[in-house]
Amino acid sequence: MSEIVLGFATSHGPLIGTPPDVWLIAPPKSLDAKFYTYRNQRYSYNEMLALRRAEKLVRLCTEEVKAERHERVQKSMNDLAAILDDIKPDVVVMTGDDQREWFAADRQPTFAVAACKEIINIALDAPKIKELRPWRHIPAELIYKDKVDTSYEVETDLAQHIVQQSREDGFDIMVCNEQPSSSEGKILGHAFGFIMRRILADRNVPIVPFPINAMYAPNTPTPRRCYEFGAMLGRSIQSWKSDKKVAICGSGGMSHFICDEDWDKRLMDEVATNDVNGLCGENDANFGSGNAEVKNWIIVAAAMAQTTRKVAYRAYTPCYTLEAGVGQGMGVMTWQ
């Protein structure tokens, strides 16, 4: 049977690939539009500014602090890459949120899997760069895509095995026997492209991507359903009749686009200790906006709970760009 040799979860936000001197997530044009999600509520930029004024977050938005935080984040990503390079898994099973990259509004499965032989990540070439929306920084985009078309192999046998096992656990996973196309063409999706490009450095490691509908109502999975899905993945991978070494990862998070250090640290504690009641009892309303991506951490925590491996590495860096708390919590965790 196959063995899960590594579990890991990591943030993948645009600040990772953007030089700190141009870090800026600008407030919306209307400072009174309720654009931001923070602790179950929706707030405008002005409301967030008033709500968090006492924290004096402006001190964390200086160029010096941003440079130091950026360096810390790069170290944690480099550490994770080194761990992968040392363990050298034969397959990487990935979970990440799909943000209209494979599935448009007319079709949004809660759980899906790629079972095609390969996945193309089309290049971010000069013509496409010109088409990018103004707020999308080119350096950040290049941590998800390359300047040349790239093909990644899919471990289809494992994908099909998990689908068969999932039926016995009460999951109906949408199977993609061909790679879906978005308005951008055939892309891997940012949650998965980040892992392949930044962490695996485009090494030819076969993958099994599971896009999760973490963000779009009404069929987003609850924290409990994510935990159950992760437990199923852990059992299924270990029942695969293969001698290959498997890693499983969750891509995304943590809190954004309002950075909430208390929430991030609580979730990391619950994930690290496999606090089932805490994770499954999390208010689903907390997972608004980019916070939704943390559900992939819950999936990995549940998968690794089916093994004897424990948390071996943990890093967290809160990154702020505006004094209202705009920014992102950057986290990395491994089970070894």
Image: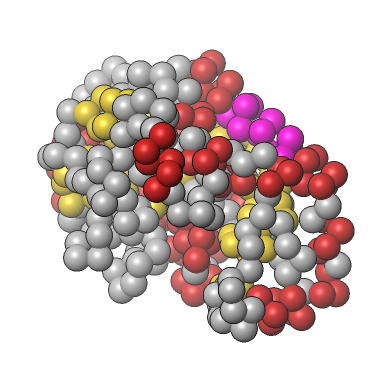
* 35 is higher (above) or lower (below) than 182: below
Q: Which residue is nearer to you in this view: 134 or 293?
A: 134
| In this rendering, position of residue 281 left or right of residue 158 | right
Residue 101, visible in the rendered structure:
yes
Res. 222 image quadrant: bottom left
Where is the N terminus found, in terms of image quarters? top left
* 76 is higher (above) or lower (below) than 251: above
Residue 307 counted in the magenta span: no
Q: Which residues are magenta?
A: 69-80
Image point (58%, 54%), residue name? 254
Image point (48%, 41%), residue name? 141
Q: Residue 3 appears at what percent x and percent y?
A: 36, 25
Image point (53%, 55%), residue name? 135
Q: Which residue is nearer to you in this view: 314 or 4?
A: 314
Image point (18%, 37%), residue name? 115
Majority SS type along the magenta span: helix
Res. 259 image quadrant: bottom right
Q: Residue 168 appears at what percent x and percent y?
A: 17, 50
Q: Residue 237 appears at what percent x and percent y?
A: 30, 34
Q: Residue 304 appears at what percent x and percent y?
A: 45, 40
Q: Which residue is nearer to you in this view: 33 or 209?
A: 33
Where is the C terminus found, in terms of image quarters? top right
